[in-house]
Image (cartoon, rainbow, N blue to C red):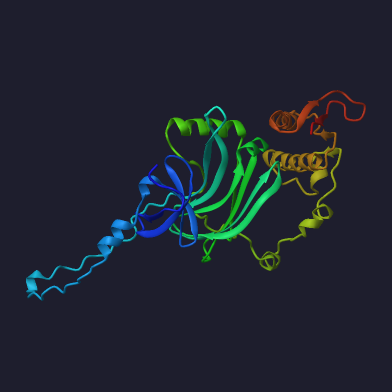
Amino acid sequence: MKYQVGDEILVLHSNEEGHIIEIMNDHMVMIEVRGVKFPAYMDQIDFPYFKRFTEKKLFPQKAAPQKIYVDQIPKEKVQKNDSKEEEGVWLKIIPKFSLDDFNDEVVDSLKIFLSNRNRVSYNFIYDQAFSNESNFSIESTINPFTDFYIHDISFASVNDSPNFSVDFSLTEPHKKKADHFETNVKIKPKQLFQKIELLKEDDKATISYLLMETYPDKEEDNHITIDILRNAGFKVYDASKIKQNIQQARSVIDLHIEKIMDRHSHLSNAEILHFQLEEFEKWFELAKLNHLPSLTIIHGVGKGKLKSEIHDLLKVKSGVKSFINQYSDFYGYGATEVFFQY
């Protein structure tokens, strides 16, 4: 193998020097750069000796001054922003393999990382649990386009269905962004075993789970000041005392128009039917809200229009177990009894 634990290395994309602290597999090593530990692929690092050699100049020489003419002065180039594309924040799992007694490759443990592929840094609270019992927690910050090594878990513990919960917040709060964003990943053993087998077949090193694409905006506050509603003439009730401010449910309701309003002679038949159906809807919902077993609706006989409308509504309403319109000593055929199911 090209590298060994303790070797000094150069990170190619950042030109920073560090050293190897662990050989993870044939393609990946754990390195430490300026006190930060993170995984790196073999092709992302190199030995630093060539860089050091080229930087050393035993006999530095000053270049002779040259004349520069106006038409030779290059035009100023516009600096472009970071070309890296944002890809979200990920939970990454790297299996660490070892050889068993039969010289077969088996998974010994799992290394857990957070990978921030966005241009924003985040504070985070991480908690890992087995069977809903917390196993490991940490609070820290992850910078843009960096990987953060968190901890290892044994491969055998995967049978306890590990759950990974992360609560993110912005290191630099923004008034239009949410105060925090919480997400979690729960891993099923069978699915993880399948992913590891595919990992080996595809000659890859990392299993990734997306935690967040972009940090969410703050939800719009649609709250209307209570005093404004009161001043406009609306009745405002305390939600904790809601039952004190609504009418009590009834097991029998009478929809004859004279029972609903005192003055109705000026109303057309269509308008009367409208008010009767409104009254039915109100008492029907109150009966369900209070979990009444049944509701008797007195609609009369007449031409049967009101009864027909109510029966059509009962056929499509949720919570209706059955209804029946049969002769009774009290209402004749002028009432329908509804039975609820909860």
Give the quarter of the figure containing the C terminus.
top right
Q: Residue at x 36, y 54 (%)?
A: 84
Residue closest to the far top? 326
Q: Looking at this view, is 169 or 315 the one in front? A: 169
Question: Which image quarter: residue 75?
Answer: bottom left
- Whether residue 19 sits left or right of residue 221 in the image: it is left
Is residue 304 placed above or below 248 in the rendered structure? above
Give the quarter of the figure containing the N terminus.
top left
Q: Position of residue 229 (x, y in %)?
A: 68, 64
Question: Taking the image as drawn, is residue 44 in sight?
Answer: yes
Q: Residue at x 61, y 44 (%)?
A: 153
Q: Looking at this view, is 325 or 107 the one in front? A: 107
Q: Position of residue 114 (x, y in %)?
A: 52, 51
Question: Taking the image as drawn, is residue 185 in sight?
Answer: no
Residue closest to the far right? 329
Q: Residue at x 27, y 64 (%)?
A: 55
Q: Position of residue 102 (x, y in %)?
A: 55, 27
Question: Which image quarter: residue 11?
Answer: bottom left
